[in-house]
Amino acid sequence: MKFKHSLVYTSLFILPVAAMAENTSLSQVTVSESASDAQDINNGSYQSRVSNIANKGATPLIDSPQTVNVVNNQLLEDRKPTSIDEALATVSGTTQANTLGGLMDAVLKRGFGANRDNSILRNGVVAGPSHNFSATTERVEVLKGPASVLYGIQDPGGVINIVTKKPQQEAKHVLGGSVGSNNAWGVNFDSTGGLGNGFAYRFIYDQNDKDYWRNFGKIKRGLYAPSFSWSNDKTEIVVGYEHQDYTDPFDRGTYIIANNTPANGRGQVVNIPVERRLDEPFNSVVGKIDIVTLQASHKLNDAWKLNTSYAYTKDSYNYWQARVTAINLANNRATRQIEGIQGSTQRNHSASFNAVGEVVTGDIAHRIVTGVDMGYTNLDIGRYQAASNSAISIINPVYGQVSTDNMPLAAANGHQFAKLKTIGVYLQDSAYLTDKLILSGGLRYEYYDQEAGRGGRTTPERLYTDDHGGKMLYQGGLVYKFTPDWSVYGNYAQSFRPQLSRAAVTEGLKPEEGESYEVGTKFENGYFSTNLALFNIEKKNMSATESRSGTNYTYLIGKVQSRGVEWDISGKLTDRLGVTATYAYTDTETKENRNLPYLAGKSFEGVPTHQASVFATYDLGNFANGQWRIGAGARYLGSWNVYNTRNATGNQVDYRETYKVPHAIVSDAFISYQTQLAGKNVHLQLNGKNLGNKRYYVSTQGLNNNVIPLAYGYEREFIFNTKVEF
């Protein structure tokens, strides 16, 4: 391919690390003083003009040859999201993936993504698997398309970076509270300020509690997060700790019946009230998360800076569930497997070391980033399972007839484990050939070593994955700026992801590989920013698992493709009218599936072809001794497909059945009032979500034997927030 050949030639201009010795200062490119420089002073606008994620440093979005979306703090404050999915509702081409009943963070980007896929970062390094969006979040950055050159093992859809709040030298203290629907209440406190001699602190506390909107369940959140920083004119160090306790209803939603005959419900969503659950009140996950972080930077001279980032995350949880495995409309009964996960712990160590700097060769200015990333993930799971199933009426369910007492360890998979070690070395150069033309190229070598397996009460432990290897990855891009405010760009990028299984032999299984082409245009001025992108992504070495003589084997089955158009705009249209709006057309296709030929030519499960959103705000001005603002918007969630490939006995067959999940339009709004009392800023805000109380679905939650779970979106709710700054 000509593009690939040109990328090799492009890589030749990337300068050796020895060039770091040059002490050069550029007008076109500047070394950011700290990671926090990428935070815009937006003055109430949703516009962001710089980001850390595309170049591992504060970079103007208009200079990047990839799509970058930023959900800034103003948008988070106005919309009041409580999860990563909700925070990304105003970003084109993102939807919820399988969250395992609400347990994990899982986001599809341009059709690609899963839980535990390493695509969620925290301050630029890999984060834990769940509850990454919290009261410590300052903003959310999304880099679209393959990002493996800078971030290692990834799917080709993109990465999400959670940027956390940092200590500030200027003293500021905020005390807040909230009440709302479903007996919701919350208290929070955020205090920061200088301690003298370059030291500063920040302490964040957040506590929330509410009843689940369905007929049973609780949602509880507790968080405290102290952090400290020290800085002088050359060095900045930030250390932090965050602890979370959480309780969530382990809810997989409602169900499409996937077995039986059509007369007995196959292909139907079970027709019961949306509030009715078919599991048990003990369906609940209780967990805790501990995060330790370190960020350090040192300015060597006017041209070069060294950066270090490290995060340790320990995510532990326990849950029980009555897992619905079949529904029969002939007798209106649901069959359930009583099981649970006890003592599940995932530990992540993520570290990044890089140098960012400027070099001039002749008339060409270069911005270079080079570094090393290292990671270690250790997952350990204990699974328990009852010896027999239980049944419950779907018309008149009687709960509490089953117990989790004395639950035995599962026979075959009672203990599951996985380990992954990675190290990556990368180099990227953005060459400012003229004041209008920017040529970039990057390469990375990624090495991995992984193992995974399981055992149980009657089955000895066995390694099913024991694999190591490496891959050289490339990316290249070109930006042409017609004016300082308008650019066009194109890029090529690769992704890489080794395959791992805790339950099936994976000997000789090649890693998944992706590649993407993208072209687009960006425009920004003092009011708003907008971007339009066209992309094509292909991913190969997809795999499937089947049983052969009592042993599960995972093998290569084919490749998939995602292509489409995305448009985003954010900022102010007038001094008083602000807006963020998006549209995404995502055309996904399974190009080849040797295991299930029926899926060839079909779209990806859970990915809508069309999505759109708009959220607008208006500054009403000053009256009644305060400043008033209102905002409202809607999201269009297009229809998407679910596929049934099972018969009544649960074996995979060529059923050729496709179920279409309906589209939905969901609307939200807020009104806020800000005034002063006794010289202190007081802010009051009322938010309404899903104002039309629309019944809608947000993702498929996997295949539970003979039913396909569908996760519900939330019902209508209102929440009133107040805060005082002093």
Image: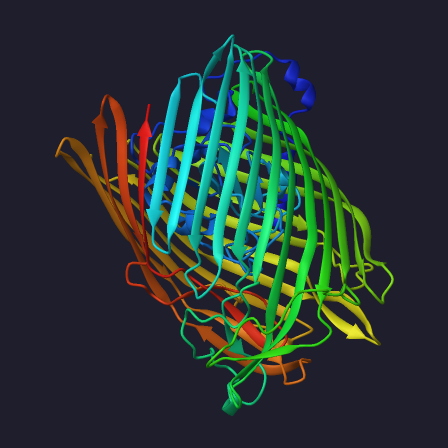
Between residues 334 and 454, which one lies in front from this camera angle? 334
Placement of 676 over or under 104, stated as above or below: above
Q: Is residue 3 visible?
A: no
In this rendered view, identify the residue nearer to me: 196 or 664.
Answer: 196
Q: Residue furthest top?
A: 197
Q: Is residue 299 above or below residue 186?
A: above
Q: Is residue 584 left or right of residue 227?
A: left
Please say which color scheme the image uses: rainbow
702 shown above or below 521: below
Relative image position of residue 578 (x, y in whole percent):
25, 41
Residue depicted at 52% across the width and 63% down the height? 251
Closest to the observer: 569 or 620? 620
Taking the spot 44% from the left edge, 22% from the top edge, the residue there is 192
Quadrant of the image for the C terminus?
Answer: top left
Q: Is residue 239 visible?
A: yes
The percent coordinates of residue 589 (x first, y second) are 54, 66
The single residue placed furthest to the right in the displayed view is 460
In the picture, measured across the screen, residue 507 lies left or right of residue 313, that is right
Q: Give the image quarter of residue 521.
A: top left
Q: Quadrant of residue 191?
A: top left
